[in-house]
Image (cartoon, grey):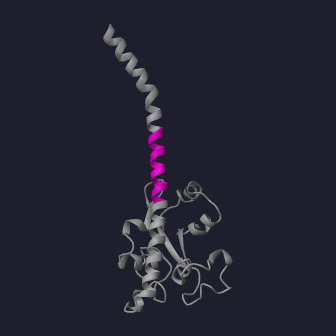
Amino acid sequence: MELLLVVAILAIVAAVAAPQFFRTSEVAMEDSRVAQLKANHAAIRAAINMAVWDDHNNPNLAVNSKLTGGNAKDGSAANNNSYVRKLIERGFLQESAAYFENEKGEKIFFRIENSATTDQNPYDSTIAKADRIASAPIFMEQSKLFQICVKNSVAKNNIDQRLRDGDTWLTIWNSVKTLAPAP
């Protein structure tokens, strides 16, 4: 009889705790995906800064290896001649940082797009004032010309622009979590 009472109490506790446990698991999964999006964006931004610095300070670097002034194009790591692929090939970026997972666990690749010509002077007045910082070195200014985006056949999200506009990482995640992988 006492054993039956203990089993009944444990069953009631399990019935109450199980939904809370599974909901917490889903929240933790979403939190980890937001953290992955944020960390990989930061890794790509740091890789861009390092590559642009290296382009300016390494005169022996082959022109087609360069991020600035080379033959790289807008695109994701899936494109052989994209900015992201150049960063991976030159060792500035891990391949696993070139994407994040959507809510279904599918890989969504980041894209890097050049918003200006590589020979444009970053201190030139044609660059928007928000994109210029007079005290920053030239290579840092030039690295701001590269925008980190997420794009598929339907939508494009310029993450850098959204951060400048004041969006939070959770807001950005909510807009990109349902994206399907680009074909």
- Camera sees residue 171: yes
Tell me the quarter of the image containing the N terminus: top left
- Camera sees residue 108: no
Q: Residue at x 49, y 83 (%)?
A: 73
Q: Residue at x 41, y 89 (%)?
A: 64
Q: Is residue 181 magenta?
A: no
Q: Main secondary structure of the magenta part?
A: helix
Q: State left or right for residue 165 relative to residue 29.
A: right
Residue 67 place in picture, x, y as percent: 46, 83
Q: Is residue 31 magenta?
A: yes
- Whether residue 175 is situated above or below residue 46 in the rendered picture: above
Classify residue 147 by image quadrant: bottom right
- Whether residue 154 is situated above or below residue 53 in the rendered picture: above
**Front in this rendered view, residue 66 or 141:** 141
Count of residue discs: 0
- Whether residue 41 is situated above or below residue 61 in the rendered picture: above
Q: Residue at x 50, y 61 (%)?
A: 180
Q: Residue at x 37, y 92 (%)?
A: 60
Residue 35 place in picture, x, y as percent: 47, 55
Residue 156 place in picture, x, y as percent: 58, 68
Residue 6 place in picture, x, y as percent: 35, 15
For the record, the magenta segment spans 23-37
State the residue lying farthest toward the top.
Answer: 1
Q: State left or right for residue 119 relative to residue 14.
A: right
